[in-house]
Amino acid sequence: MFAIGFDGKTVTPSLQKLLDRGVGAVALFSRNVESPQQVARLCYDIQKRAGRPVLIAVDQEGGRVARLRKGFTPIPSMRAVGETNDEILAHSIGQVLAAELRAVNIAMNFSPVMDVDSNPANPVIGDRSFGADPALVARIGAALIRGLQAGGVAACAKHFPGHGDTSKDSHFDLPTIPHSLSRLEKIEMPPFAAAIVAGVSAIMTAHVIFESFDSENPATLSHAVLTNLLRRKMKFQGVIVSDALEMRAISANFAIEETVIKGATAGLDLLAICEDPDLQNRAIDALIAGVRSGKVAENLITDANRRIERLIKQYVRPAAENPDLSILNSPEHRAIVERISSVPVGPDPTERSTT
């Protein structure tokens, strides 16, 4: 039930310890990347050293947020993709992403952003969104999801139930959205409903308080949002993954032990902790203690593991030790990308977290 990040371009002792403890997923960042060959080898070694299938994931959205750059096809921002209003092209972009991730032994993309770009003052979403029209975001995002998953890579729609209309960055603050339920159902939620219909494998939570659902807890830790809304009302059966729990929206307001208990009971399946090995081990200890003390029901753990194992079985293939990397930045892929009018790539606002 843990997705962990680490510092290094090879399997480190701290990563090995966490693999031995049974973590289900590893998230890669720019700090883990040197070249396509090195990434492929790292992913191979992670699987080999774990001795079991591990879900290896990355944020490869395009535009500002792309952990894999040198040697890979440069993907434009999702705003540029949305501006084409072309579902077939969005599907093709998903297939390009999938082919290149599969080539280096990566099975999951923490993408696409399904937030609606409804607030020009938003410091973290902006051109990561397909656009300001919920219907457009729903159509183009669903097409990209289908392309990714047809190519054998699990997609992850984010950030549920919508991070588009905030003026604060949840890396540093805890945003609050006061909108009525009717407004959320009209603007924020339709893209996620479309993602579910498209069969998206995972949905990532927003570290945002939605007062219409829960005035005290951010969505990541809210039973009302994750279980009552996403599971029961919207009928999502896939994996619910947290955004990085070190982000200040969470870590400045909740101790890691409280976060783990609240998150698991709210409905999280996969808890992302991306930087500190000590924090990662404390989190695992906290979940074990929570089950033993009865604070976390065992059936929640069983159900979460069942969903994670189903996703791993569907998408994690035996890693290739010496994969064919000729597809990376190939003429065929560049030709698809060149059909999109790109925008300049600015600074990445998410480098230390899975947002």
Image (cartoon, helix red, strand yellow):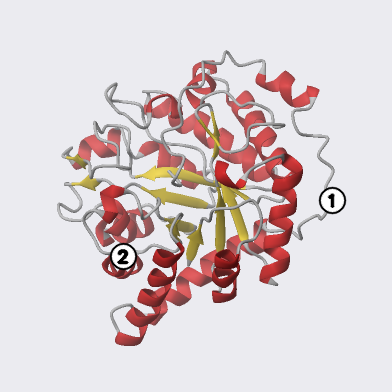
Q: Nearer the viewer, residue 233 or 310?
A: 310
Q: CA distance from mark 2 to mark 1?
A: 39 Å
Q: Is residue 248 above or below residue 312?
A: above
Please tell me which of labels 2 and 1 falls first in the chain: 2
Q: Is residue 339 left or right of residue 31?
A: right
Q: Which mark is residue 73?
A: none
- Report the residue marked by disc 2: 256
Location of residue 2 in the rendering, given as x and y in whole percent from the top left corner: 48, 64
Q: Dot 1, crowdedness within 10 Å: few (<14), some or many (≥20)?
A: few
Residue at (35, 68) in percent of width and height = 264
Q: Nearer the viewer, residue 64 or 126?
A: 64
Q: Callout 1: helix, strand or loop?
A: loop
Location of residue 256 in the rendering, given as x and y in whole percent from the top left corner: 31, 65
Location of residue 55 in the rendering, given as x and y in whole percent from the top left corner: 61, 59
Name the residue type under label 2. Answer: Ile
- Report the residue marked by disc 1: 322
Count the numbered circles shown.
Answer: 2
Name the residue type under label 1. Answer: Asn
